Amino acid sequence: MKCSFWLLLAVILAPGFKLYAQKADSTYKYYWVSFTDKADSPYQVDKPEAFLSARSAARREKWNIPITEQDFPPNPRYLDALQEQGATIHHRSRWLNAATILISEENVVEIASLPFVKKVEYVGFPYKESERRKPNIKIDSLRSKQLDGQYYGYGTRQIQWLNGDTLHQLGYTGSGIWLAVLDGGFIGVEESPFFDSLQAEGRLLLSRDFVDGDQEVYESSTHGTRVLSTMGANVPGVMVGTAPGATYACIKTEDTRGEYRIEECHWVAGLEYADSLGADVVNSSLGYTTFNDREMNYNFDNLDGKSSVASLAADIAFKKGMIVVTSAGNEGTSTWKHIGIPADARLALSVGAIDFSGERASFSSLGPTADGRIKPDVAAPGAWVTVADPFAFQASIASGTSFASPILAGLVACLWEAFPGKTNEEIVEAIKRSASQAGLPDVELGYGIPNFGKAYRLLQEPVEAQSPPVAVPGELEKK
């Protein structure tokens, strides 16, 4: 899947300012509108049921995370005022106090001049509804030979490389953990026998499509299907994923029809939706550096964890008690070579890819961040790994950090199931401590390849018995 999704070169519009790279016509386009405040909000911190699920509120209570004004949706009066100017609200951001709107270019100046509007940024344009794709799939009988004596089937090595089978043998499969998957589409999930147990046990939550604004996610792309299979597949002898007992939410945020900054807006909305559902872990096998509109492209200096709304949102999600696992990117052999966004987020667990010799896969993107932080954080199998075929009942092969990320995310869910009283910070710290390069992280594999059996043992130890924190070197040389 081609990466996309930057909000760089954002044009801040104010009265008297010229619209950047726009024609003076009535073409409808998408804009990200940031608000100045949440003054006179109708929402209240002691009535979170108006904007959060009971599970989401319980997560905050469990970890002593206060519900604040940051959790409030944007002021409805502000949204009404945008609509009065001819805008259609596509989605909104609670954490960043913003909305994505569709409006004609000739009316956007009026929007920018509203007293409660902080800035307006052009982020893309709408596609025709007819361009959406949802094939008619009917998956027939098993086509892969079942491997006798191999419970994980063709996916055995990718689990054993991380010692994830140890967690499973202890009885931890992700049960009780809600895992949200942000991706570009999930063709075939509702038909595939690989996900029968998710369907039968009601462990596929209400899906949401933030690209088209509906609940149709089993369309557009098979990327999300393959990603989901590395975690949720459950056909012993053929393929069992890293978290077959977890509960999943399929959330479509990637628009496969083109590359524009609006995908970052979709991503933020999808992440906030995951929070509002009460998700514990989020996997994002998406990254963004370049767009169809070259003037939207990011450069290396933007990989600072704060230039992108997606990276900002990823950090907020962690502070709300979640763990966001994200792919580092597949640019290791390109002229770009660096990680993408939101892999640069300070609190995201960014994952690079290794092959089955334990070496970095050549395509796996490199760190550090622009401000010298270690990224990727860790690495997992991502070259020639096993995934479910979206169109047939058989195991298939795929490569990319897109698959290293969910393979690891599933085991994050299992580890957290084993230690439900540990915070997200403690879980992530144990994973880094367990990794093969914990004492000497680098820009290729970060802290290295985690050992989830070791992470389990580390979390069993009393704090005073644990070794010192993993080494964090000083600012690395920018390359």
Image (cartoon, rainbow, N blue to C red):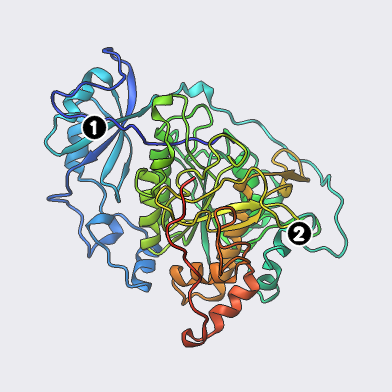
Q: Quadrant of residue 157?
A: bottom right
Q: Residue at x 27, y 19 (%)?
A: 105
The crowd level at tag 1 (other Cα within 10 Å; few <14, some 14-19, many 20+) is some
Task: Give coordinates of residue 349: x percent, y percent.
Answer: 50, 58
Type of residue at label 2? Arg
Q: Quadrant of residue 184?
A: top right
For marks 2 and 1 on the same chain, the one whose residue lies earlier in the sequence: 1
Q: Which residue is mark 1?
A: 12
The crowd level at tag 2 (other Cα within 10 Å; few <14, some 14-19, many 20+) is some
In this orientation, which residue lies closer to the viewer: 202 or 114?
Answer: 114
Type of residue at label 1? Ile
Q: Which residue is mark 2?
A: 157
On screen, residue 412 above or below 171: above
On screen, residue 347 above or below 190: below
Q: Residue at x 52, y 58 (%)?
A: 377
Q: Residue at x 51, y 61 (%)?
A: 178
On screen, residue 177 above or below 298: below
In this orientation, which residue lies closer to the viewer: 431 or 236?
Answer: 431
Task: Give coordinates of residue 45: x percent, y percent.
Answer: 22, 62
